[in-house]
Amino acid sequence: MTNRNLRRQRILVTGGAGFVGSHLIDRLLERGDEVLCVDNLFTGDKSNLDHLADQPRFEFVRHDVCFPLYVEVDQIFNLACPASPIHYQFDPVQTTKTSVSGAINMLGLAKRVKARIFQASTSEIYGDPSVHPQPESYWGNVNTIGPRACYDEGKRCAETLFFDYHRQHNLEIKVARIFNTYGPRMHPGDGRVVSNFIIQALQGEPITIYGDGQQSRSFCYVDDLVEGFLRFMDAGPDFPGPLNLGNPNEFTMLELSELVLEITGSKSKLVKMPLPQDDPRQRQPDISLARAKLDWEPKMQLREGLTKTIEYFDELLKRNAGPVEGLSRPTR
Ligand code: NAD
Ligand code: UDP
Ligand code: UDP
């Protein structure tokens, strides 16, 4: 590892034009690192990086991680992968390729340049969990052939690859299992519950509750998540994870809709829609390990985080004036 005091770290962020990646890049640049962002702009957007146009320590390369990449870096954050169900189900074969071939290429790169490498894994590897809340020791309950499998199984295989490179090649790895995260720069057409409810409320459209709305999720604000990434990455090499990162405060989708309606002051009505196949009933991270090892826990309460996210979408909708349906189709 390069000594931070001797020279700047050069850090590769794959998927850096996306929601989480763009916030991570902001933090890395703020602390003085050089950042190379690699993204194929499948679900990400360069507008998330527009504010960095004059930043000399930032570089963008349009590239698909399914293909080999030869660059010289000190650390790698591997975030490249569509994250929302409608995006990862749009081209499921490509989703698995991104997770698996992308992981192999980034691990091969890390091995060659002796870089520490972080993997953005997911709570989805727990599937529809039969243990609640989910500790890292839980092995999960995933349907291998369902519509979510391209993402869940791709991410599970990536975890396997990370740990095999760690054991076989002594690679320094950091595997984080991220739970539902929200905040500014979420893709307005990604169909995720937080962006859907906010946009529907702001536009006075019906709020779409899938199923009975009693299913639960635990929502983490993006700044809290990124803080967890950095603490984990900078912790010693003897702590590869896997590590849950998320907010343990759990809400039903009905509770979330009520909060969004209250903050926006919207008069939107609720409308019930069918529950998507294999939709997990509940999800809540057990973050005891992150608390103990990193002294990390989320600080942002849902009400405050939603208020910031609503401000972002309000501004975005005013700029783009009109309904957002046209934004929901990913491009490659
Ligand atoms: P996002 O879709 O906004 O960002 C993903 C980025 O990866 C996009 O910029 C996209 O263009 C890029 N990408 C996709 N395929 C690629 C490829 N083959 N080559 C290069 N770039 C590619 O999603 P996000 O919410 O920012 O998620 C970032 C990471 O965190 C993903 O790996 C995701 O699986 C993981 N994660 C996110 C959440 C969440 O709630 N946001 C939860 C669990 C895990
Ligand atoms: N790889 C890459 N960049 C590098 C080194 C490797 O993209 O700087 C890719 C390479 O295409 C290879 C993969 O990473 O297929 C795995 O590399 P590794 O050295 O582990 O395996 P091998 O090259 O022996 O198949
Ligand atoms: N959901 C909903 N209405 C929407 C979008 C999603 O009720 O307009 C539900 C969805 O069925 C799921 C939860 O909200 O139970 C979270 O969905 P999301 O796609 O945000 O994330 P994930 O299912 O991957 O956790």
Image: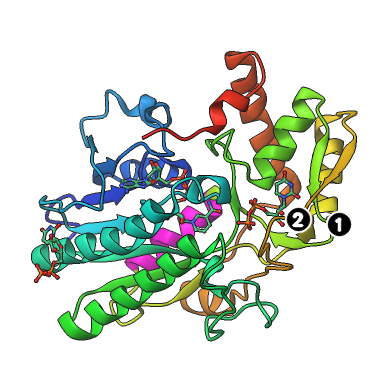
Label 2 lies in ligand 3 vicinity (Cβ under 8 Å) = yes
- The x and y percentages for residue 64 are 26, 45
Instruction: Look at the image and give the residue range highlighted in magenta.
Output: 223-234
Q: Are marks 1 and 2 in contact (CB under 8 Å)?
A: yes
Circle 1: element type = loop
User: To which quarter of the image does residue 171 belong?
Assistant: bottom left
Q: Which residue is mark 1?
A: 212
Q: Which mark is residue 67?
A: none
The kind of secondary structure the magenta stretch mainly shows is helix
Q: Is residue 119 magenta?
A: no
Residue behind mark 2: 275
Q: Secondary structure at mark 2?
A: loop
Foreground mark, 1 or 2, reads: 2
Amino acid type, residue under disc 2 in the picture:
Leu
Residue 295 visible in rendering: no
Q: Is residue 182 above or below residue 17?
A: below
Image coords of residue 139 (percent x, y): 53, 84
Image: 30 above or below 251: above
Q: Residues within 10 Å of mark 2 (few under 14, many from 20)?
A: some
Nearer to me, 105 or 313: 105
Residue at (65% x, 39% y) in the render = 195
Q: Residue at x 64, y 28 (%)?
A: 313
Amino acid under disc 1: Asp
The image quadrant where one finds the N terminus is bottom left
Label 1, label 2: how far apart the Cα atoms are: 8 Å
